[in-house]
Image (cartoon, coloured by chain):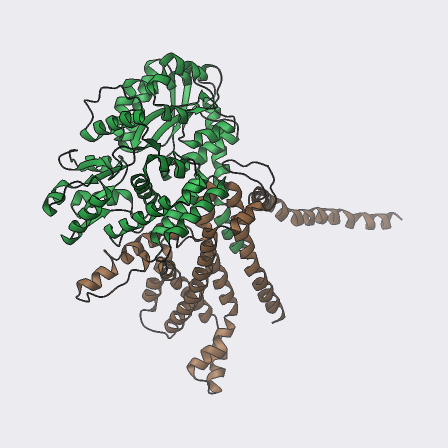
Amino acid sequence: MPSFKRNCFTATRFPRTGLALATALAASVSLTSAHAAGEVEVLHWWTSGGEARAANVLKDLMEAEGYGWQDFAVAGGGGETAMTVLKSRAMSGNPPSAAQIKGPEIQEWGELGLLGELDDVAEAEGWDQLLPETVADIMRYDGQYVAVPVNVHRVNWLWANPDLLEQVGVEMPTTLDELFAAGEAIREAGFIPLAHGGQAWQDATVFETVLLATGGVEFFQQALVDLDPEALGSEQMVEALETFKRLRGLMDDDMSGRDWNIATSMVINGDAAMQLMGDWAKGEFTAAELTAGEDYLCAAAPGTADAFTFNIDSLAMFRVEGEEHEAQQALARLVLEPTFQEAFNLAKGSIPARPDLDMSEFDVCARQSLEDFQRTADEGGLVPSMAHGMAVRADVQGAIFDVVTNYFNARDMEAEQAAQRMVNAAKAAL
Amino acid sequence: MTIVSHAQERPVRPAARRNAAAHLQDWLPRLVLAPSVAITLFFVYGFMLWTFVLSLTSSRMLPSYDFVGFAQYARLMANDRWWVASTNLVIFGGLFVAICLGIGVMLAILLDQRIRQEGALRTLYLYPMALSFIVTGVVWKWLLNPGLGIQAMVRSWGFESFTFNWIVDPDMAIYTLVLAAVWQASGFVMALFLAGLRGIDDSIIKAAQLDGASLPRTYLRVILPCLRPVMFSAVMILSHIAIKSFDLVVALTGGGPGYATDLPATFMYAHAFTRAQIGLGSASAMLMLGGVLAILIPYLYSELRSRKHG
């Protein structure tokens, strides 16, 4: 039965063939581009309307300085597709000059010996003073700068519909207890207290926020960043898991598989009162022509006012030679310059990676975000987001996602059991 | 002498020509087939081999050749999610093939009764097959959503206690996949069987009738056994649809709630391509292949053998 075989193998083989195809494609691209002088090729997935315009700002800045810019935008799958293309390019020995890589992945690429250093630019521009230490650490491999931060997203936000809150007669909750109390009131009034989408990463986003609220910054660091087995199996973890599951009572029954932006639109439409989501949710509110602080409210997620879970996009620089190297260094410098930081982050809803900018153009939420960013950076409340790939490597992250989402959805799983599984997942990955 | 030599020479030339022609005729198909055979060998079997090699390595983000024996298989066996995915495939595959065959045969037999408007009905049942699984998945996702779809509709008719929330129930969600897949593929099975039924010699049926067999008995004992080859093709096609199911899961449930509806194909993709565990992903791909072969080889063997004998 040849037809069976062929099809069966399509299922297992397709992605690999895709990889080979991408390699071939990439090779043909490189043939045409290799000889252009002083040009950078940047792999990214800023492809949606606002993002693409923002990326264009960088292109214009580069061109104004006389460098060429070759756009290598790969849309789709939250960067999954782009990473596949990048891997095939890297394997064929022809990486782009820069690529959108973030968090611990920078270290993985560094270990492969593919990244080039940016220390000259960093020194000339004073990145050490400019960037908070936690952020700078992520941008360095082996003590040298290899990547440059583009923006900072805050993950631990609570978004709310002010009309609905007023109608029910509750205030914006600042602690988890207040959140549960407000939720009950909202439920009684006939609305959904918390909009949520039942996808693994959204479950994990809410989970890490709850863990931050119940366990505090230090525990967050131990459990989700350092993967300390003792912390992962501790009472505090059990408490975080139980509180997380209690939040399920504030959500509606149809959330399974819902996209985050649909959940946000439930808040916009007044079906739901609140949502725990990172500040990219602002894009949805803005698209609905609402004004921050008036038509929708933002506040640090309940119980996490003194913490800041960050999700930072960055451009990692690959090792390249000659004129391309020169252009690449210029690119790194321009990315952190105020012009680009302002334009890009206004479009994307995030805040600039350097805290010294004039924020008058930004909305209330972004201004608060930046203020908290600086404050937590000084006081030590700045933590990388596990749910958004800033804290641990992709395999560990995936294993934690599995435990979290399974526990959240299972009817008869004890929190202790989930905590134990998390310990196992962390051990297996180390 | 000369005559003899002439006589000998003459037939030699045409023979040589015939020989060359025969050679060409012999080799031409092979030559023409060679590229596709080479491509298949390389892209299918070559990559299969490569996947096997990778499954023995510690490859993470990029393929590496640091061999670790069967450690990835051991990790896979210890992985909770893999077992969920495998169990799901057994449930989904088994039910999908069985129900599709059942419904397909029933529809085919009913349509075979020379009813009016048969062509229109046939098209109607066959149409779902024209959709891609992504479309099927999205449509059923909406239909099955308790707040939007069937449950909400029946409740709005006044049956307030009606519940149909399989898709958000981790224990039942896997059956929504069966539902959508059966909806899509039964019509196709019907078409296969209908073609088979039409191909059966009338005289056999008449002989059965003369012998006094009732209609159900005729179908059960005479006609369906004749359709064994059709059954064979149908099972083959359905089981490969079941095993390669990926798009349906992605569109309908996204693997959720939690990972309750994960299948090996989605597991493999997630681990090899988003979680930077190429070694583990390859190991799961090899096990999928092993599973397919374990089911297929005995079936192929018995079917092809009995056909040769029968």
Q: Name chain B's colour.
A: brown
Task: Write down the colour of chain A.
Answer: green
> Which image quadrant for residue B104?
bottom left
Give how far across and how far down residue B302 sits, in percent: 59, 66
Q: Nearer the viewer, residue B258 or B249?
A: B258
Badge count: 0
Q: Position of residue B223 (x, y in %)?
A: 48, 75
Percent coordinates x, y for residue A303 in the rendering: 25, 39
Q: Is residue A42 above or below residue A197?
A: above
Image height of A391 relative to B220, above or below? above
Is residue A215 rendered to the left or right of residue A228? left
Residue farthest to the right, as pictured: B1
Q: Residue furthest top?
A: A124
Quadrant housing the N terminus of chain A: bottom right
Q: In this view of the protein, can residue B255 be seen by the observer? A: no
Q: Residue at x 30, y 54 (%)?
A: B141
Question: Where on the picture, by quarter, is residue A391?
Answer: top left
> In this view of the protein, can residue B265 be seen by the observer?
yes
